[in-house]
Image (spheres, rainbow, N blue to C red):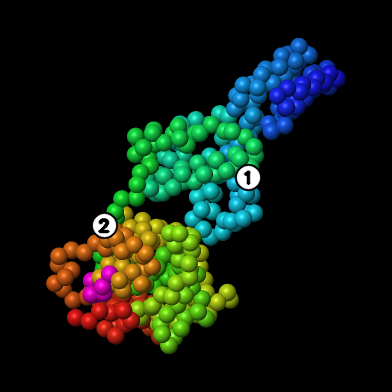
Amino acid sequence: MRSAVRRDTGVDTVASIINRDGRWRALVRRRGFKSQCKTFDTKGQAQAWARQVESDMDAGNTSATLGALTISDVLRAYRGLRDKARPISDSSNEHYMLKALERGLGHHRLAAVRPDDLVDYATMRREEGAGPYTVNMDVSKLGTAMRYGAAALRITPPDIVGAARPLLTHLRLIGGGGKRERRPTEDELTALVGHIRANYGDVYADAVVFAAMTAMRRGEVCAILRSDIDQRTSIVPVWRKHPRKGKALERVPLLGGAMALALRQPESEDGRVFPIHPQTISKYFTETCKALSIPDLHMHDMRHEGTSRMFEDGMTIERVALVTGHKDWRNLKRYTQLKPEDLTRPASRIRPDAERPRGNRPSASLDRDRSSPGKSRR
């Protein structure tokens, strides 16, 4: 065995050449770098390779520092870092973004990943139904994970996200959120809820109706506890996204038949009104839209629908904001797609629970009682 130790600029490097069964294994180790190991037929080849690795380390060549590390390694390091201070919930969007990145890009070596690989990933996500904004969120999360995960591993990978962004933008694989104008027609909503009820069960159908009545996000709908509902005031506390606090607990009024619909749900073991997973309800919603050939409609559009119906029913913007949780009233415009004829007709009446068996029918109409909290006087 031959070992050489260099001490220069305060950095220790150890290069070892070992004969094993007639072949020569070279091992190079340096503090702050991932160890490099390779086996050769001759001692001279092993020595030459070790000198090259040391030279690359001196020059800051990333391929020498990254070795066989993959994107999966960096994503795991990032999760480990977050676990120490700000854990990622298994039900959060961030968790599912990281899972998607792991599935689509995890196998790529850091030293070899190229912008084309991110294009392939973005194309795969688009084929799965993700829009440019969603893919952009994935790519941004990859950049964040690479930056902090790499710091945890004490490596400096190439800025593959920065290199790929111009190409992804040019190909229109990533982009801004834009403003959706899609609202379901009454026929679409009735058919959609009926199909979900018949194929996936009452709890999923009622959760969709509840989302449309309350303008809540799917995660908020699935987190409500029966014991938290104040039946005297028709108010329930809801943890909501906050632009500065991350999440904040807000008191949300349940308008119209929303409270009755919630209270008619069977009691669950964990106390939730709708004991289902947010991702599952979105999955069933999407599958139903495909089965019924309903184009360009998403579960989150139920929040749009509920907000728009509040305006149609005459509620003022400050009262709508109290229900939806918007801090900036300007943001309500993107959830409200009103047409001139909406102002000249009575509030719409729809019963998406029409197919529910008699005797177990919730008050699931999207109507709002004239005496509902927050209703403006005309």
Name the residue nearer the viewer: 20 or 142: 142
Q: Which residues are magenta?
A: 312-317
- Most extreme residue toward the bottom is 232
Relative to 178, say whether 34 is above or below: above
In the rendered structure, find residue 314 and report the number of the disc placed on it: none
- Most extreme residue toward the top is 44
Q: Horizontal placement of 37 versus 111: left or right?
A: right
For disc 1, the marked residue is: 77
Residue 129 colored in magenta in the image: no
The quadrant of the image that shows the C terminus is: bottom left
Q: Residue at x 40, y 58 (%)?
A: 287
Q: Quadrant of residue 371?
A: bottom left
For disc 2, the marked residue is: 181
Q: Quadrant of residue 122?
A: top left
Residue 189's x, y, as percent? 31, 67
So how many labels did they put on this image?
2
Q: Mark yes or no: residue 205 visible.
A: no
Q: Secondary structure at mark 1?
A: helix
User: Please, what is the dominant secondary structure of the magenta stretch?
Assistant: loop
Give the Cα distance between marks 2 and 1: 40 Å
